[in-house]
Image (tube, coloured by chain):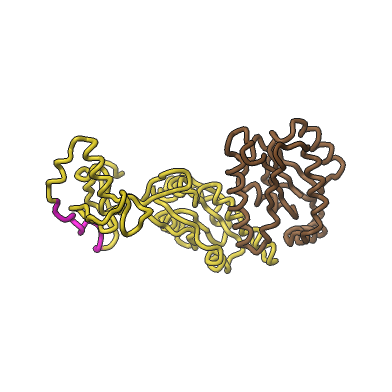
Amino acid sequence: MITAERKPLAEIKESIAPYKKLLVVGCGSCVAECASGGEKETALLASQLRMDARKEGRDLEIKEITIDRQCVYEFIDQLADAIDRYDAVLSLGCGAGVQAVAEVFGRTHVIPALNTTFIGQTKEAGLWIENCRACGDCKLDYFADVCPVTRCAKGLFNGPCGGSKEGKCEVDPDTPCAWQLIVTRLEERGKLDAMEKVYPPARWSRKGGKGPRKITREDQRA
Amino acid sequence: MAIFFCRQLDAGQDLNRRSLEKELGSRIRFFPLPCSGRIEALHLLKALESGADKVYLVTCPVGACRYREGNVRAKKRLAYAQGLIEEIGLERERLELVVPSVPPRTTIDRIARDLLAEETKLAPSPLRVKERGEERRTGKGYRQEGVRR
């Protein structure tokens, strides 16, 4: 899931300042799961903005709508009937969602209300942790399904570094040592001999550096 | 004033709150919850947005929640909502947690009367002041929009 956090209200207010009619659009997928851009959060932000405007004596008309996915055209199309009646869109989608909506409705200013943060997992209620850097060359199979690129502060492919204490990372004592997790799980699976191997560097060229990455599948194309 | 409260606090809450609502009219609105853990920050904000000067959340005492931790969650959600209204310059005191003593030996209408006696400490909501002005111009009445009873 892609995680995000709401921007400070002052930053949002500055961005929407020129507009009097605002369509606030939530996204019912990843950002709903991480409680930053779903239906509830969209309604909360809209309520805050309405009260703020009324308190300051400003005219601001707001309509809220949450679509299932802001990054897929079929869902974005649901905004078509409403969008022309508003001066701008305030999006509670991730960065991909904001750009997709702006691409479909090119003349409309689409303002991000969230800071997109990382690819992560819901660890427990109210806690999300980063566990994938989208490096494009997944090696989880080698490392007992624990990503050392993301979860080891030093990104070691051939760990452990020897600095962990009681299973915690020496860089951040609140973070479990990724290599401790790897070794423990390999042991549980009876595959500790995997520790004997020396793993070559990943193909970092797949991570980026040549502009936006893309995936093409002919069988999925129209 | 809006009062969200846990129904488990007072077995006779249905009659008790209705009699007070009848007596005081639009000055007070009750919102019974199956458990205070049902509260969402949005309920609290909507009540303020709809014109309440003050919103109370009445929970069971700590350790007495029928669903174990509903009151603990309610407290956290109220704190979150307080942060949201502070962001727009409203006093956090406009949202207040009320926890009766252990065990609760009172009724919701008595709790509400005590709260009403303290109500004057807070100035009218700046949103309500604007709304009153709006009412005069449009003739529209006070509405609790978006808050389900």
In the image, residue A212 lies at what x, y percent? 29, 59
Q: Would you say B52 lies left or right of A103 here?
A: right
Residue found farthest to the right: B23
In the image, residue B102 lies at what x, y percent? 70, 39
Q: Which residues are magenta?
A: A199-210
Q: Colour of chain B?
A: brown
> Which residue is nearer to you in this view: A197 or B39?
A197
Residue found farthest to the left: A197
In the image, residue A214 lies at what x, y percent? 28, 54
In the image, residue B105 lies at what x, y percent? 76, 36
Q: Colour of chain A?
A: yellow
Is residue A158 visible in the rendered structure shown here?
A: yes
Q: How many marks?
A: 0
In the figure, A169 relative to B31: above or below? Answer: below
Q: Residue at x 68, y 53 (%)?
A: B95
Q: Residue at x 28, y 45 (%)?
A: A181
Q: Main secondary structure of the magenta part?
A: loop
Q: Residue at x 70, y 49 (%)?
A: B47
Q: Residue at x 41, y 44 (%)?
A: A123
In the figure, A45 relative to B65: above or below? Answer: below
Is residue B149 visible in the rendered structure shown here?
A: no
Magenta-drawn stretch contains A209: yes
* Image-quadrant location for residue A46: bottom right
* Image-quadrant location for residue A206: bottom left
> Which residue is nearer to you in this view: B67 or A22?
B67
Residue found farthest to the front: A166
> Which residue is nearer to you in this view: A185 or B130?
A185
Name the quarter where the C terminus of chain B is drawn: top right
Magenta-drawn stretch contains A93: no
